[in-house]
Image: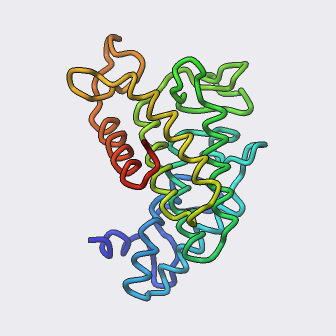
Amino acid sequence: YILEYYEDMIDEQGNINYNYRLENFNIDHIKPGVNLFTLYEETGDERYLVAMQALRHQLSVHPRTSDGAFWHKQIYPHQLWLDGVYMNTPFYARYGKEHNEPANFDDVVVQIRVVEEKTRDANTGLLFHAYDESRNMPWADPVTGRSPNFWGRAMGWYMMALVDAAEFFPQGHPGIAEIQGVLQRLTDALIAFQDNDTGLWYQVVDKPGKEGNYQEGSVSAMVAYTIVKGVNNNLLH
């Protein structure tokens, strides 16, 4: 199944064909690279190594905010989205482990830290979906640069990034403790908004009674996955 999935994406030279353009600087395009490590290990096919290296190169030249966090896309300049952390950090951390690039781990922590700093609400502990450093987007608060809502799925993606990236960190790396702190804060904040009857979370997390809002399955699955993996890997207590 995995081989077939990538067969149409990667040509005989290892070029990524699936609408991939470096100049688009789309952080979403990094995420499909997470399986290339296993494919290369299992098959020895150099195409997968070439494709991995192309994605790694993107991260080396990808535009960033002044605080060092990757823009979500070239068409969304100066913007950070929670889901962007999920799209890049597991790949980035595993590349660091597999290809002996220890500086990757420090940069992964920067991505996690900056996004939390820019999106965290001091009152609830929840994270707003996005942040615009330029304050040019109509949704951006003119003072904070934040988007107006707590989108559950975005927090789910961000949480999964923390546990998925952390498993590739070297034992004793100081970034693990920082990731633990971020994960614990967000988990505690989300549990306060969990529906008591169903155990689920709402699509807009802090507005359970708002018309049109609903209990969302993928939010709840992502949070559950994160909590289970976080506990099993000693990242949550």
Q: Nearer the viewer, residue 215 or 72?
A: 215
Is the image coloured rainbow, by chain, by secondary structure, or in one colour? rainbow
Where residue 127 appears, x then y in whole percent? Answer: 53, 30
Residue drawn at the location 61% of the way across and 46% of the way down: 178
Q: Nearer the viewer, residue 67 or 147?
A: 67
Image quadrant occupied by the N terminus: bottom left
From this view, report whether residue 204 is shown above or below residue 67.
above
From this view, report whether residue 48 is shown above or below residue 35.
below
Q: Extreme left residue here?
A: 197
Where residue 236 appears, x then y in whole percent? Answer: 44, 44
Is residue 154 shown left or right of residue 121? left
Residue drawn at the location 62% of the way across and 55% of the way down: 108
Residue drawn at the location 55% of the way across and 55% of the way down: 88
Where residue 78 appears, x then y in whole percent? Answer: 70, 39
Residue 39 quadrant: bottom left
From this view, report whether residue 70 is shown above or below residue 167.
above
Is residue 124 shown left or right of residue 115? left
Image quadrant occupied by the C terminus: top left
Q: Nearer the viewer, residue 181 or 61?
A: 181
Is residue 134 shown left or right of residue 108? right
Badge count: 0
Is residue 196 shown left or right of residue 36? left
Residue 227 quadrant: top left
Residue drawn at the location 55% of the way across and 56% of the way down: 89
Where residue 129 appears, x then y in whole percent? Answer: 53, 31
